[in-house]
Image (tube, rainbow, N blue to C red):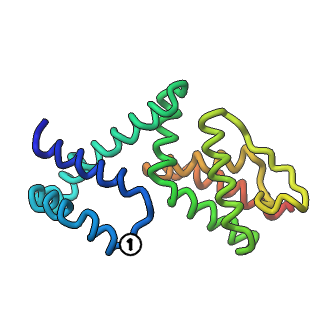
Amino acid sequence: MSDLEKDIKNVIETLLDGLKKSTNEEIDRDYGQRIKEVVSTNIELFQDLEKFNVFINYKLDNILEVCIAEANPSIDSNKIEKLCFLYKNYNFIEYNLEFLIKKYEGWICSADKTRWLVDRYQEYIVKDAIPDMNRSEKCYWKPCFGSGELWMNFCESLFDLYYGQPQKYLETTRELMKCVNED
């Protein structure tokens, strides 16, 4: 194992050990010295974005993909790729969902609705389950517009958008906006 591979392994172990939410002071206290060592011995990787992407991000992505595939052995590789995207880009998906919900329904319960949709999207990836959008007054966590299929298509479209192909995102967003106008 090369020094770079050892350093990457140590960074991964540090990240996994620190899954708890920590403040910068806690991170510095717990891992500051190791972080300084990793950065100083690999400074060229942190000064060149392409090298960082190739030698750090690529390996981190592969490690995550292997972990997710191991945790979900019955899922095919295409779904693993989507599941990895969800894990790596949770905030990106959440922010996009929350934006639409807040814009058309306001702030009230928007976090609950967003969280519910992200959880349903994970189920959709793993089990091909379209969420039930039937609403009653007790279903405050469900958006009041759009079908389950349309919301899952929107989540799927974020994958394409992230990778520079906005067509599906634009079409699905338009469809969701039509649903607002119909309700």
Front one among 82 and 3: 3
Work out whether 145 lies above or below 125.
below
Which residue: 41% across, 37% down?
67
Which residue: 55% across, 56% down?
93
Front one among 29 and 120: 29
Q: Position of residue 91 (x, y in %)?
A: 51, 60
Q: Which residue is mark 1?
A: 23
Label 1, secondary structure: give it.
loop
- Most extreme residue toward the front, as rendered? 30
- The quadrant holding residue 103 is bottom right
Q: Position of residue 84 (x, y in %)?
A: 46, 42
Label 1, residues with CA under 10 Å away: few <14, some 14-19, many ≥20: few
Q: Quadrant of the C terminus?
A: bottom right
Report the number of numbered marks.
Answer: 1
Left or right: 40 with respect to 121? Answer: left
Work out whether 59 lies above or below 16.
above
- The quadrant holding residue 138 is bottom right
Left or right: 62 with respect to 118? Answer: left
Which residue: 39% across, 34% down?
66
Q: Position of residue 45 (x, y in %)?
A: 16, 56
Which residue: 60% across, 50% down?
155
Q: Quadrant of the N terminus?
A: top left
- Most extreme residue toward the right, as rendered? 136
Q: Position of residue 38 (x, y in %)?
A: 16, 57
Label 1 amino acid?
A: Thr
Left or right: 60 with respect to 99? Answer: left
